[in-house]
Every structure is written in C-alpha cells, then in structure tokens.
Amino acid sequence: MRPIRKVYIVPNLVTSANLFCGFYSIIASARGDFLTASWAILVAAIFDSLDGRIARMAKATSAFGVEYDSLSDLTSFGVAPGFLLYQLALAPLGRVGIAISFLFTLCSALRLARFNVTASTLPKRYFQGLPTPAAANLLGTFVIFQNELGMEQIDRSGWMLFLGLSISTLMVSSVAFPSFKQFHWRSRTSVGILLVGMLSLVLILLNPEVCLFLVGSLYVAASVVWNLLWRTGVIPAPPLQIEGPRP
C-alpha cells in the first residue's frame, strides 16, 4: 500500500466546504426548511467548481483530492437532493417515494463512478450523462422557483416524481452534455454563443430565484435535442471518445 504523501490544504478546504453544504442541506431538509436546503446544494456546487480549478492553478492536484472530491459530491449532489426529494414531496407515496428518492442517490453514485473510470477516455468538451451537480441544482432550483412564484401549495408529488425519474435517467444515460471546463476569459467563440451566455448571466442576476431553474432547464432540453439531431444524422456527430478504455 502506497502512503499518502501530499494532502494540499486549500483545495481540500474548499472540498470540505462543499461537503459541509451537502451535510447542512440534509439537516435543513430534516427540519422542513426546504428553501435553505436547496440553496445549500447550490452553494455546494459553487465550491465544487472551485476546488479543481484552485488545485490546478496552484499545481496542488493529488489522488487524495480526487477521491475526496468524489465522496463529497456524492453527499452534496446525491444524498442531500435525494433526501430533499423525499422529505419535500415523496414521503406521502410510502415505499414508492423511498424507491424514487433512493434511485436519485443511486444514479448519482453510478454517474460519479463512471466519470472516475472514463474521465481519461472522453474529451473535456463533453460529459457522458447529466453531471451530478447539474442534476442536483436542477432539483434545488425547482424548489426555489416554486417558492418564488408562490406555488408551494400545489401538489408537488407529481412534479417531483417526474423530475426525480427524468433527472436520474439522464445521469446514467449516454446523452452527451456540453462541458464548460475548458472555458476561460481568453477563449474564442462565436458572437451567438457569447450573446446567449451574456443574456443568461443578465437574467440570472436580475432574478436568480426564477432564472436559475429556467436556464438549467434550457441547458438540459437543448442538450437532449442536440443529441437527437446528431443521432438521427441531421448534424455531424461530436467526437465523444478519443482513446480506448483504461485496462
């Protein structure tokens, strides 16, 4: 067994903040404070997007950090949203509610495990399946969206059942989702993409409670339509594999 020689402080502190947000979201859901639980998941996603960037910028990447990040992601984007889903809407469904809530957590774990195995075989421009942070955020922003529009009194079971099943399916699917991992301020892009990005940013800043869910939904819907178009031969297929799988 090889000893762990390097554990970098700053990136792992950020990962710990991600883990804490997921843990706090579970506590908030248990108390019935679903709005706070949803915001905690969103904040966890912010920390998750920062830890890897900080590690690369500081040249502080490590195998320990990669594994710790995956475990934190499972808590924040698998267990926490699954528990939120059950406590908020699916508890009245009994065993069916438990099964759907667990399915979300299970698909999150499978999605993270697949990513760890295939990360080196896929181009950085695409994700295979809906990423777990995006899936959890879609669920959390829907709760915030409902609260902002005063829709708390509607029957949530049907909507949350649909979201839970569809998001879980997309996580373990082979649908390619565009990634923005390689995007930075010096990147070149078309004017159309720039305008869409700027418009989305402005809308989110003006009304984040509503537009975060709408922009997330648009990203998922556009990705699914894009996959249907290239699978039916309407547009050229993207390069989704650059080398063989690891032994």
Image (cartoon, rainbow, N blue to C red):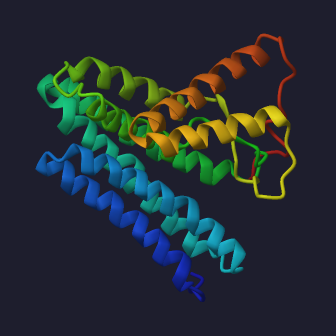
In this orientation, which residue lies closer to the viewer: 156 or 186?
A: 186
The answer to whether residue 228 is left or right of residue 65 is right
The answer to whether residue 25 is left or right of residue 45 is left
Tell me which corner region of the image, top left, top right, bottom left or bottom right, holds residue 81.
top left
Determine the residue positioned at 79% across, 36% down: 240
Relative height, residue 236 to residue 33 (above, below): above
Asked if residue 178 shows in the view, the reply is no
Determine the residue positioned at 51% across, 41% down: 204
Q: Position of residue 44 (x, y in %)?
A: 42, 58
Residue occupying the far bottom of the picture: 5
Relative height, residue 107 to residue 181 (above, below): above
Tell me which corner region of the image, top left, top right, bottom left or bottom right, holds residue 17.
bottom left
Q: Position of residue 188 (x, y in %)?
A: 87, 48
Residue occupying the far front of the picture: 206
Determine the residue positioned at 13% across, 26% down: 94
Q: Position of residue 142 (x, y in %)?
A: 36, 33
Determine the residue positioned at 77% across, 35% down: 193
In this orientation, which residue lies closer to the viewer: 106 or 12?
A: 12
Q: Position of residue 218 (x, y in %)?
A: 57, 27
Asked if residue 123 shows in the view, the reply is yes
Screen quadrant of the N terminus: bottom right
In this orientation, which residue lies closer to the viewer: 100 or 203?
A: 203
The answer to whether residue 23 is left or right of residue 56 is left
Relative height, residue 7 to residue 20 (above, below): below
Q: Give the total number of marks visible in the rendering.
A: 0
The answer to whether residue 202 is left or right of residue 14 is right
